[in-house]
Amino acid sequence: MAAKKPIILTIDDDTQVLAAITRDLRQEFSQDYRILRVNSGPEGLATIQELKAKEEPLALIIADQRMPDLEGVELLTASREFYPDAKRVLLTAYADTEAAVRAINSARLDHYLMKPWDPPENLLYPTLHDLLDAWQVTHKPPFDGVRLIGFQWSPLSHELKDFLSGYMVGYQWLDYETSPEAQDLVKARGFAATDLPLVICADGKTVPNPTKAELADHLGIANKPLQEMYDVVVIGAGPSGLAAAVYGASEGLRTLIVERQTPGGQAGTSSRIENYLGFPTGLSGAELAYRAWTQAVRLGAEFLAPQEVAKLCVQDGYKVLTLTDGREISTKAVVMTTGVSYRTLDVPGIDRLSGAGVYYGAARTEARSCGEQDVYIVGGGNSAGQAAMYLSTYARKVFIVIRGANLAASMSAYLIEQIRHTPNIELLPFSQIKEVCGQDHLEAVMVDINGTVEKRPARALFVFIGAKPSTEWVHDQVLCDSKGFLLTGRDLVTDPRYAAVWKQTREPFLLETCVPGIFAAGDSRAGAMARVASAVGEGSMAIKFVHQYLDE
């Protein structure tokens, strides 16, 4: 999108003078500037306020001194509140020269011009060119994408940051407490601090306190199904769900994928995946998810987000999914790739500070705000290791808190080696977090190290202590193991409850649950391997079994 031309605004109640100055300005400056004209002081001030609200770039204001209701000096003085950097020129007659000279100090005038200014080549253009050149040197065009204004320690602000990042939407974050620009934007658009977080979309629309669904709507992300019946609905857009959507759509199935948050699942929050086939230098989880999402949509899959399936039931062999907003979706087959969610850390203060310094998962959006401060990571798996490497770029020190003696049992060797050679990452073995401290945000952690409890300052705490399957909502329909993971294939056949629930003459397919036509893939399936490559493989395989089921 081309940047807007800056504006030159001229204000005069004398129509002849206004027409003359406008004509001369357009003749010389119209190629690089937009020339606006207004014929009264109050209307001029209203125009300036309106331009500010629309975030139009105003380079130069030329106002006549002798105007009823509002004199030029008063107008130019008032304009400083809205455009402090705009150049200000007073148009004056010889009799008003003294007032113009005084106004150079009081209104911080940049120049005054005597009427008439003929010839303009000598008496008008050189001065204005100098002023406009000086303005261009210091002018910083406003960010023309999505802007998010909020409070650093607001959990909702953090959620919206993660949501925008998850969909690879470039945005500018403005902290209301520390950014004068943020405060000006909120005021200019008629909002207050109580309306934060505030999202300003690229088209200029302003959305106060948005839900993720409202934000998705403004960003053009579909949240309503387009068809009444699908061949397959994939629930969850992690690596396995995205793979199922890609293969389902590419093989001609009417495919819908429903995601409650952002594409990629837990893998999508990874700062760097270095052991995925075909990417020798690694890639971020968000990048992998975005590529796969784009691929699925290009091949014809529909994508609904942020939407959550609340209920699943079977009617005459068809599967009916009820979304949390009450809508129903009918499909012939379902692939459940609901993944897992992080287990919560059960220590004093954790609920109060969650999203305000305490984060579950990598929370890449918060890394830059950790500059030159200490952060703590709880957990010793690959996700924790990848987060530690990423955070070490910004934080003064990264502490990894683990209960065991070392990382060898739970982390890949390549990550252990990288951590060992990163000087600002320190491993705290035989340790655990006992408490998190702070008023409105995390300020310190109580760490038990080898039986000794220490209080240490902390900018952030990132928690990776295992995961539980996101299957609670479907326990009444399909069989799960004792930990809540979905039973499929041979694991289902060997379960004591199998004979009572499976009524088909054939055995269930490899990834099929106890309900014919409902399949499971990825981390929420019992026996699955927690690796991106295996999740992608299972999602792809699930579509093969969907075809076999539909052929029946």
Image: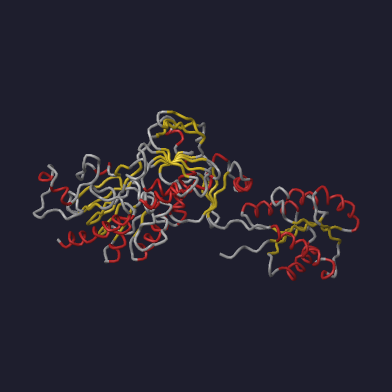
In-image side of 397 versus 228 (left or right): right
**Looking at the picture, how far across and down is residue 391, in whole percent?**
48, 47
Q: Is residue 443 above or below residue 338?
A: above
Identify the residue at horizontal 31%, vertical 62% (top origin): 246
Q: State left or right for residue 156 relative to residue 314.
A: right
Quadrant of the rendered image containing residue 63: bottom right
| Image quadrant occupied by the C terminus | bottom left
User: On the picture, is 242 further left or further right than 542?
Assistant: right
Q: Of 360 and 472, which appears nearest the observer? A: 360
* Residue 533, above or below 28: above
Colour setup of the view? secondary structure
Task: Using the image, determine if residue 545 lies above or below residue 441.
Answer: below
Tell me residue 460's x, y (percent). 48, 40
Q: Residue at x 51, y 50 (%)?
A: 393
What percent of the width, then of the height, locates residue 541? 24, 59
In this rendering, the count of numbered labels is 0
Between 79 and 417, the one lying in front of the other is 417
Q: Which residue appears farthest toward the left when viewing the image? A: 505
Q: Split into 4 quadrants, where in the image is the N terminus? A: bottom right
Q: Is residue 125 visible?
A: yes
Q: Position of residue 476 (x, y in %)?
A: 21, 41
Q: Is residue 71 visible?
A: no
